[in-house]
Amino acid sequence: MGQGLEKGSVRYSVQVVIIGGGATGVGILRDLSLRGISALLIEQGDLAHGTSSRFHGLLHSGARYAVKDPISAAECIQENAILKRIAPNCLVSTGGWFVQMPGDETDYVEAWLQGCQEANIPVREIPVQEALEQEPLLAKDVLRVFEVPDAAVDGFKLVWDNAKSARRHGGRYLTYHRVNEVLRDGERVAGVQGENLLTGEPFTVESLMVVNATGAWADRVAATAGASLDVVCDKGVLLAFNRRLFQRVINRLRSPGDGDIFVPHETITIFGTTSERVDTPLDHQPTDREVQRLLDVGETLLPGIAGKRLIRAFAGVRPLHREDRELTGASGEGEGREVSRTFALIDHEVEEGIKGFLSVVGGKFTTYRLMAEKASDWVAGKLGETAPCRTAEEPLLPALSERLRRKALALLPCAAAEKMLERLGQEAVAVLETIREDPGKGQLLCECEMVTVAEVEKAVADPDAHHLADVRRKTRLGMGTCQGAFCTYRALPLMWREGEKYDPLGRELIRFLNQRWKGIRPILWGEQLRETEFTRAIYAGLLDLQDKGTTTE
C-alpha cells in the first residue's frame, strides 16, 4: 500500500484520482498536493516501472527538435533550466554535442542553427581538433561540432523524489493497483474501480475528477469511460555499455533517426534509439535484429563500437499523440518520428461530453513538470481552486546539511557516501545512524552501484516495496556491470527477515533474474556471454536454482 493509506482498506474518497505512476502522473500528484488539493494516484505496477525508466536518460536541451518540432524544442529548453534548479541531485549537467559527419545533410545544419536560435537554445561551435582531444573515441572524420546544454537524468530518482515531495504535502498513492473502469454518474465521472493486484481485493475510489496519465495505456483507460484517444505506441530500443565511452551527450547532427545519440550515466553509456510502431505497450522486448541495426549505425560516430562491451539491451514504448491521422500511414519504418513530441491535454467534456475527465498524452520525460502544471491548472480551474503552481520554484528535496554530508563521509567511502545522499536525501539520516550503530552494515552489498547493506535493508522494509525489482528501482541494486550476479543473492537474507511480505524467495529470485535476462539475451557474445555463463553457474549450479516457467513483467 502507498504511504498514508490504511492497509486492507478498499474504499477511498478524494477530490482527484490520477491514473498512472510515471513521471507525468507523479508530477501531477505533487503539483496538486502543493496546491492543497486532495489527490490519490493509482499505478498498476511500481512507480517508474514503465516508460519513465525505459529511455536513454537524456534531459533534452530541445536542440533535437529545433527543425521539425519547434514547440517541443522551446518546451524542452525551458524545462531543462527548471529541472536543473529544482532537482540537481537527479541529473548531471554533462553538456551535449551535436556532431556533423560526412554524408549528413549540409543544409540541415543551417536550418538547425536557425531553429535553435528561435527556440532560445544556446549553441556554441567547438573547434574539431579541440573536440577530438576532449572525446578521443569520437570518429576522426567529424566535420563540425556544436555544444548545447543537454544533461543526463535518472528517471528512477526523479519519479521517486516527486513522490516523496507529494507525500510530504499530503499526496497519496497506491502501487500494484489496477484501474479496471472509470466510473460515471451520467455525464460526469464519479471515480474509479479496480483490483489490488497483491491481494486480489477490489477497490473503489470516489472522486470529483479523474486524470488519465497512463502514457501508452491512455487510450485503453479512456475507453473504460466511454471516451476515445488516438495514441501511437512507438517502441525504442537502447543499448547499455559497461563504461563511460563519452564524457558528454553525443548527438548526430542530422534529421532524427536510429542510433544517433550516446548518453553517459555514471560509469556506463546508453546508446540509441530506434523507432518502430507496435500494437501494445507490452511489446518492449529488444530483438537481435534491432541490436545489430543500432551497432551498424553507431559505427559512424564511434568506430569499433561492435568491439565495446554491452551489458544490456532494453526498450520503452513512447506514447505519441496523433491528432491528424493523415500525418502518417498505417505502418512503415520510422513513422513514429513524424509525430510531434509535444503533449496534449484532452478535456473529454469538450470532446465527448464527459465532465471531470482529462487525459494527458504525448510529451517528453524532460517536459513532465510542464505537463503536470498544465493538467493541474485545468483541475484547479474546474474545482474553483486558486492556489498557483509552485513546482517550478520549490526544490524536490530539502537541501542537505553540511553536517549530514560530513557524517556520511566519515562512515562511508567518498563515492558511496555521495551516491547514497543523492538517492536518499534526508532519508539518509536513518541509514547512517544504522551504520554508526553497526559498522558492518556499511559494507557494500552491491559494489557496481555502491549500495550498502543498510540502504538495501531500508528499501526491503519500505512499505512500497513488494518485489525484489522494487528494491532495484529504489537502490539500483543489480543495475551495474554484473547485472545482479553477486548482489542479488546477498539481498535475500534481508528479504527473509521481512517474513511473509515477499513471495517465496526462490520465486522472487527467479523473477528478478529473468527480468535481467530479458535485457541480456539479445547481446550474448564475447565478455558478456562469459559473464552470463558465470552467473548461471552461481545460481543454477551452486544454488541449484531452476526456472520452472516463472513469468516476468
Image (cartoon, grey):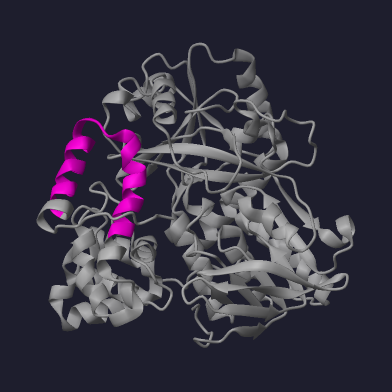
Q: Position of residue 115 (x, y in %)?
A: 68, 30
- Quarter of the image with the C terminus is bottom left
The answer to whether 462 is drawn above or below residue 512 in the figure is below
- Tell me if 141 is positioned left or right of 331 in this view: left
Residue range in magenta is 510-538
**Visible residue check, residue 390:** no
Along the line of sight, the residue nearer the viewer: 493 or 116: 493
The image quarter in which residue 24 lies: bottom right
Q: Residue furthest left?
A: 542
**Residue 507: quadrant of the picture:** bottom left
Task: Give the dominant element type of the magenta stretch: helix, strand or loop.
Answer: helix
Residue 541: x and y, percent? 12, 52
Question: Closer to the camera, 193 or 531?
Answer: 193
Q: Is residue 267 left or right of residue 187?
A: left
Q: Is residue 383 above or below residue 147?
A: below
Res 322 → quadrant: top right
Residue at the image point whose x is 41% and y is 78% from the top:
463
Going 53% across and 59% down the picture, which residue do you hit? 85
Q: Is residue 374 above or below residue 268?
A: below
Let me know if residue 515 appears in the view.
yes
Inspect the magenta stretch and tell me whether residue 143 lies in it.
no
- Residue 103 x %, y %: 52, 11
Q: Is residue 56 left or right of residue 449?
A: right
Q: Position of residue 184 (x, y in %)?
A: 80, 72
Q: Is residue 279 left or right of residue 435?
A: right
